[in-house]
Image (cartoon, grey):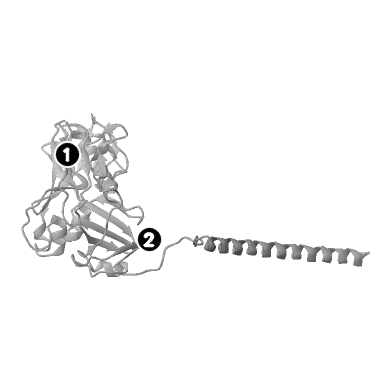
Amino acid sequence: VDYAVNGATDYAGESVKENEIMSGTESLLDSTVKKIEDILGGKTPSEPEGPGPQKGLTGEQLKEKIGAYVDYTPDNPEDATYSTTQDGVERSGNAGGEQIISRDTNLKWRIMAADGDKVTLISETIPTETLTLKGADGYNNGVKLLNDACNTLYKNSSLGTTGRNARVEDINSLMGYTPTVGTEYALTSKYYPYIFADEKTGYVDSGYGTKLGQSDQDDWYSGSAQASYLKGKNNEYNYTLSNYKSTNTVQHALSTGRKGEVGSTNHIEYWLASRCNKNSDGKVSYYIFKIWNGCLTNDYTYTSGGQEWNRSHALRPCIEIDLTKVNIGEIGSGESTSPYSIAKR
């Protein structure tokens, strides 16, 4: 009886194996027939998705190519626009209401920084259209408005690139400048834009904020309030660019937005997507950084005394690139007449 049971078990096992083999063979045949049908029907069989091979320049090589030109084109239509009215609310504080900013179709792009697989381009020149920031909401939302506008107008979804505005850290890096830690101050006038309570240098009533650095902002803020107790840490500074990099360097040219590497420092002013504040006689002014006439400086839009100011400057678009998604420099020399190519990997 034992032999009979074992024999039946062996037979059943062999039968299962045969069925599995037949099933696998049929599946392979079906797949092969489908591919043949696709080819005969003019279709190309699908290939597994994934990045293509590394071509062109590596991140380390691009790190040595600051100022080189890249043949980058945004994927938005040439008439793309950005509105300062977001989520049904005008966010800039502009007295005239909604502002519409259009894409500049004449920009050329140069390498500003490279770190590992991350490469940042900056526009060679400065778009002529301006963004007006006013009062508490100009300070509240300046960083996000500038970054969102540049991303909307200049990103390329097919390449996986994103846009943002230049920020104070970009200029400091180009100049080799390290800002000093700000001194603490207490205030006698106590109005503050709501974002100040989330800033790491802003103390509202009971403690310093923990969420935002000078160039950080993901959410919209609206309005202002009066604190019971208000203090902060000075993080405003300014300097002349040529004190750190000569006017004949590519770093100076990139910072000021001049064509070429030598020439006048007079140019269009532009915003940096970074906030700062400074105490004076018990009153703090809330600033947005800017580049002006060869200098890194700033404009305030609101004060702790409740005063509002209206400021208008241009944007300065930057493009963030991931080298695991694209290749740069397979073609071209990086000169203005032969920019490096950029293509999806």
In this image, 8 relative to 226: left or right? right
Q: Of 153 and 263, which appears nearest the observer?
A: 153
- Residue kind at label 2, given as amino acid type: Lys
Q: Of 206 and 223, which appears nearest the observer?
A: 223
- Residue kind at label 1, given as amino acid type: Thr
Q: Residue at x 10, y 37 (%)?
A: 281
Q: Of 288 and 313, which appears nearest the observer?
A: 313
Q: Residue at x 14, y 47 (%)?
A: 128
Label 1: which residue?
A: 132
Number of residues whose C-alpha sits closer than 10 Å to that of mark 1, classed few (under 14), some (14–19) or many (20 or more): some
Number of residues whose C-alpha sits closer than 10 Å to that of mark 2, classed few (under 14), some (14–19) or many (20 or more): some
The answer to whether residue 156 is seen in the rendering is: yes
User: Disc 1 or disc 2, which is closer to the eye?
Assistant: 2
Coordinates of residue 178 in the picture (x, y in percent) = 19, 57
Q: Residue at x 24, y 54 (%)?
A: 318
Q: In which quarter of the image is the C terminus?
A: bottom left
Coordinates of residue 131 in the picture (x, y in percent) = 18, 41
Label 2: which residue?
A: 325
* 92 shown above or below 262: above
Q: Which of marks 1 and 2 is nearer the N terminus?
A: 1
Q: Is mark 2 on a helix, strand or loop?
A: loop
